[in-house]
Amino acid sequence: MAEVRILPSIALERRTRARRQGLDPAAAVAAAILATAMLLAWLLALSILVYDEPPARLLRMAAAVLGGPALLEPASSLDAHAMSLAMVAHFSFGTLFALAFLGIAGTQAARLPALGIAYGVAAYFALMHGFDALFPWLAELRTPDTAFAFAFFGLVTAQLYQAFAQGASRRA
């Protein structure tokens, strides 16, 4: 009977400690930026290898989110302005999505990878289906491989955060 009383108190103490520790901001930002870079690399690889499109086309789509549809052409080349806007758009939105996920998921270490995959798929549907009235050019990215890339983004965000947060707690 005494063991039954001890176990819930240990579990409560662990949950309280995890809440006190909270989200590691440096680990969250590092994971978000790196996962966003990996998503961009994955999407560019799909664009080139699967769809035989110039990488400038995908980057112009990202740039047009901030700069308007005039940036969609010419799809085969990329100037410094379009490239800058594409990087700002991709890394800003990717990092915000990753930080939002980590803020929602918190420190649920055991479930973080599965939650990351689910969040990545939700982000895909939000962006590719929810914003189509504002950015109709994103509709052509509604493919299973893009959905998979977003699921991968969520998983990588979760795993990188766990690795960076564990490394930081070991150094502390």
Image (cartoon, rainbow, N blue to C red):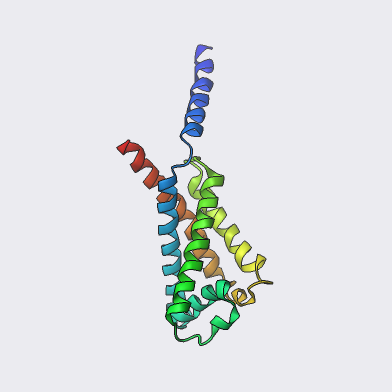
Determine the image quadrant of residue 134. bottom right
Q: Position of residue 107 (x, y in %)?
A: 49, 40
**Quadrant of the frame with the N terminus:** top right
**Residue, x 66% and y 65% (percent of image)?**
130
State the count of labels.
0
Q: Position of residue 145 (x, y in %)?
A: 52, 69
Horizontal arrangement in the rendering, residue 34 relative to residue 171 (left or right): right
Q: Is residue 3 above or below residue 168?
A: above
Q: Is residue 96 above or below residue 127?
A: above
**Residue, x 52% and y 59% (percent of image)?**
151
**Residue, x 55% and y 51% (percent of image)?**
100
Horizontal arrangement in the rendering, residue 1 relative to residue 136 (left or right): left
**Quadrant of the frame with the C terminus:** top left
Q: Residue furthest top?
A: 2
Q: Residue furthest right?
A: 133
Q: Is residue 16 above or below residue 109?
A: above
The one of 117 and 22 positioned closer to us in this rendering: 22
Q: Residue furthest left?
A: 171
Q: Position of residue 131 (x, y in %)?
A: 65, 67
Q: Position of residue 39 (x, y in %)?
A: 45, 64
**Residue, x 61% and y 77% (percent of image)?**
137
